[in-house]
Image: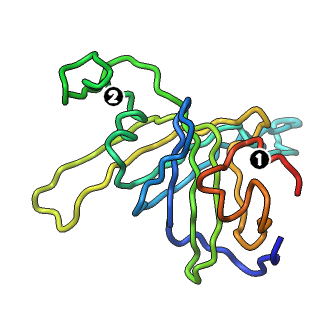
Amino acid sequence: MDTVFEGVFSEYTVAGISFKPSGAEAYINVDGAGSASEEYERRTVTKAKSNVVVKRIARQAGSGTLTMSLHMPRELYNTLQGMVTGATGALATGVSGLKGIMKLPSVEIAMKVEDEDGDVKYKYYPSAVSASFSRSVDSEADSVAEVDMTFNLSADSYGMIMYEALATELPTSGALTAETWMTAASSTLMQQSA
């Protein structure tokens, strides 16, 4: 561990995103990441006496969503959306299509986020599945539209939905460092002690 970050870390910009679809051997980096937002579900338990709430407890519900807008390589896009392609032999060469009913692959997501001062935070989502996507075409727009994707997040075998670490607080050597996070992040590495 180099230093302990003191102060406020305000997530300002997504500096990089990498995806590792189920069965893939390596992460696929997506350059020029756009934006991301996350939301985690809570469950509230209440205790009442004579119709008066006397106790309220909030707990993690064990799931959440990650919404992103970004430009994505076509092959990765096809994989995450469950597109059937000519390469699989199911369609004519060069043709891809979205099948009506198909199980989508899970994906691991590693993200690099910076604050307004350039300080870095890494995030890792161990179990995500594409819940929805949208894309639009606007010939009058001043910029090229990105793909909007929402992923459902669920817990890994350790019960974790998301992991994060500030770059300055990661070890400088070993299997999980600031240098390796975007290409090697895994639930197992997150559990190992330094």
Identify which residue is drawn at 57% across, 62% down.
112
User: Which one is in front in this view, the residue at disc 2 or the one at disc 1?
Assistant: 1
Q: CA distance from mark 2 to mark 1?
A: 31 Å
How crowded pointer 2 is (Cα within 10 Å; few <14, some 14-19, many 20+) is rated as some
Identify which residue is drawn at 40% across, 40% down.
76
Front residue of 117 and 168: 168
Residue type for callout 1:
Leu
Front residue of 9 and 27: 27
Left or right, residue 104 beside residue 108: left
Residue type for callout 2:
Met
Q: Which mark is residue 161?
A: none
Choose top left, top right, bottom left or bottom right for residue 122: bottom right
Query: Please, is residue 123 above or below residue 7 in the view?
Result: above
Mark 2 lies on residue: 83
Identify which residue is drawn at 50% across, 70% down.
13
Earlier-in-chain disc, 2 versus 1: 2
Left or right, residue 187 beside residue 116: right
How crowded pointer 1 is (Cα within 10 Å; few <14, some 14-19, many 20+) is rated as few
Q: Position of residue 48 (x, y in %)?
A: 85, 37
Query: Please, is residue 116 above or below residue 142 in the view?
Result: below
Mark 1 lies on residue: 189
Colour style of the rendered protein structure: rainbow
Choose top left, top right, bottom left or bottom right for residue 59: top right
- Does dot 1 land on a helix, a strand or a loop? helix
Identify which residue is drawn at 82% across, 45% down.
57
